[in-house]
């Protein structure tokens, strides 16, 4: 039988540039689901181990701070080594750490296992993944990154509900075992699929500059600096909301643990999914003619989210709270759809992973303050006021983005051409 030559082989059912989106969607979904497990079973951990609100907040803050420290390293590594291998190894690492979290017995063990081990694994993933997507998508960049970002919402909803149900039925330890085990299994499957079939070079040969060159280039890009500051405020809002909203609904409105875990994220993430898909698809079309549109959309979205954030913690009516969560989610999704696409518009391609790592690192340093800050407000009896005060971050961020769109972006925009895929099938 005569074999087909490479030129006569049937094209794949799913083009590689979209197949990688499927795998990365699943990986990022597990990333967020694993992170949400702790937030949902938090009341069970608190009662079982006798931890205070500030101690619980400290565990969450330690995770975020660890990720912030590792992100710059992850970005630098992501511009120099195979991104597909980094992605698989990071998924395996945080999944193993999630599994081991079920054996934690106090603050110290939670910080070491969950915050440090899981934090390093999760931090290594983001820069490599978004740069990997950006490498294969230019005209469809916002849409592709938006699909990847939507995994955050799916993982948060599914993880929140399942972790609450499993924790209520079998104990909080079981939630960590189930989600961690599934993540390890996914890492094994992705290892054989991505590494064997589609090894893609991280950067073209000869384009691996020294770290000093990278930093000197990035600090001159004022649009990227402003966007990093704004993302820091947005991450502060997201971390504070995700950590304490389940507890707020459970304590303030009397919802069961499973219901609080589900409804704290359901309306928010569903509308965020709508926002990120609409924002990504629409931005790709408009940005071809008006490149600054991505920044303008982000700024307007943050400003529109202000009233929703306020009523999220200020209303005594549960229906109003749900509406506020949905509105906040829609605005957040529109903003999220252009996070990395906006950054890549002003940063040279060979620095994408490093720039993403530095930007997210800063945002997580700022965001790491939210769980413990809101934990202190809860301990003083005003968790609702703390949730409402998150609106200030959106006000400042929205104004800053609009200023950068008109003042800095026009001079710093880089028009990029698509990169041909470098695929070797074994």
Image: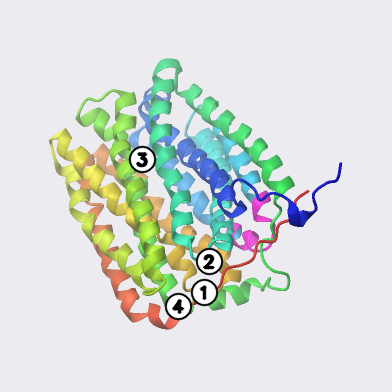
Contact flag, marks 2 and 1 (Cβ < 8 Å): yes
Residue 81: say if magenta: yes
The dot on residue 243 is 3
Q: Is 335 above or below relative to 329?
A: below
Residue 383 coordinates in the image, percent (x, y): 23, 40
Contact flag, marks 4 and 3 (Cβ < 8 Å): no
Q: Is residue 5 left or right of residue 384?
A: right
Between 36 and 290, which is closer to the camera in this rendering?
290
- The quarter of the displayed image where residue 291 is located: bottom left
- Give the distance between the C-alpha atoms of the residues marked 2 and 1, in whole angstroms: 7 Å
Element type at mark 2: helix
Image quadrant in which the N terminus is located: top right
Q: Is 237 above or below relative to 420?
A: above
Most extreme residue toward the top is 169
Residue where numbered disc 1 is placed = 218
- Which-is-in-front pick, marks 1 and 4? 4
Element type at mark 3: helix
Residue 101 coordinates in the image, percent (x, y): 53, 31
Mark 1 crowdedness (10 Å alpha carbons): few <14, some 14-19, many ≥20? many
Residue 83: say if magenta: yes
Residue 110 coordinates in the image, percent (x, y): 50, 35
Element type at mark 4: loop
Residue where numbered disc 4 is placed = 413
Residue 140 coordinates in the image, percent (x, y): 48, 61
- The quarter of the displayed image where residue 131 is located: bottom right
Query: Does label 4 or label 3 sit earlier along the sequence?
Result: 3
In this rendering, does residue 236 appear at all?
no
Residue where numbered disc 2 is placed = 355
């Amino acid at each position: 039988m005569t074999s087909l030559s490479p030129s006569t082989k049937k094209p794949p059912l799913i083009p590689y540039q979209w197949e990688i989106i499927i795998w990365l969607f699943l990986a990022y979904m597990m990333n967020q689901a694993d992170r949400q497990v702790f937030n949902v079973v938090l009341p069970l951990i608190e009662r079982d181990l006798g931890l205070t609100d500030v101690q619980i907040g400290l565990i969450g803050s330690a995770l975020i701070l660890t990720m912030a420290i590792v992100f710059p390293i992850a970005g630098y590594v992501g511009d120099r080594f195979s991104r597909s291998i980094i992605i698989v190894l990071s998924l395996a690492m945080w999944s193993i750490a999630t599994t081991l979290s079920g054996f934690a017995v106090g603050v110290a063990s939670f910080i070491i296992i969950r915050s440090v081990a899981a934090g390093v694994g999760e931090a290594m993933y983001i820069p490599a993944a978004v740069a990997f997507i950006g490498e294969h998508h230019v005209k469809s960049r916002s849409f592709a990154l938006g699909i990847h970002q939507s995994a955050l919402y799916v993982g948060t909803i599914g993880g929140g509900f399942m972790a609450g149900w499993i924790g209520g039925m079998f104990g909080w330890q079981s939630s960590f075992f189930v989600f961690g085990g599934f993540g390890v299994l996914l890492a094994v499957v992705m290892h054989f699929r991505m590494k064997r079939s589609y090894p893609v070079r991280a950067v073209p040969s000869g384009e691996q500059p020294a770290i000093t060159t990278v930093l000197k280039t990035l600090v001159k890009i004022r649009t990227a600096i402003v966007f990093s500051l704004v993302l820091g405020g947005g991450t502060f809002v997201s971390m504070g909301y995700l950590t304490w909203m389940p507890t707020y609904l459970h304590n303030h409105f009397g919802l069961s643990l499973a219901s609080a875990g589900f409804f704290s994220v359901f309306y928010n993430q569903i509308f965020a999914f709508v926002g990120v898909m609409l924002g990504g698809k629409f931005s790709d079309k408009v940005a071809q003619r008006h490149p600054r549109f991505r920044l303008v959309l982000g700024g307007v979205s943050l400003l529109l989210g202000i009233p929703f954030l306020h009523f999220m913690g200020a209303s005594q009516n549960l229906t109003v709270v749900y509406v506020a969560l949905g509105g906040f989610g829609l605005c957040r999704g529109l903003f999220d759809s252009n996070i990395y696409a906006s950054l890549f518009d002003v940063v040279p391609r060979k620095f994408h992973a490093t720039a993403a790592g530095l930007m997210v690192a800063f945002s997580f340093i700022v965001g790491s303050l939210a769980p413990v800050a809101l934990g202190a407000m809860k301990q003083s009896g005003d968790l609702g006021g703390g949730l409402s005060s998150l609106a200030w971050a959106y006000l400042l961020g929205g104004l800053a983005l609009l200023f950068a769109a008109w003042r800095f972006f026009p001079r710093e925009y880089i028009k990029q051409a698509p990169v041909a895929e470098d695929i070797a099938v074994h």
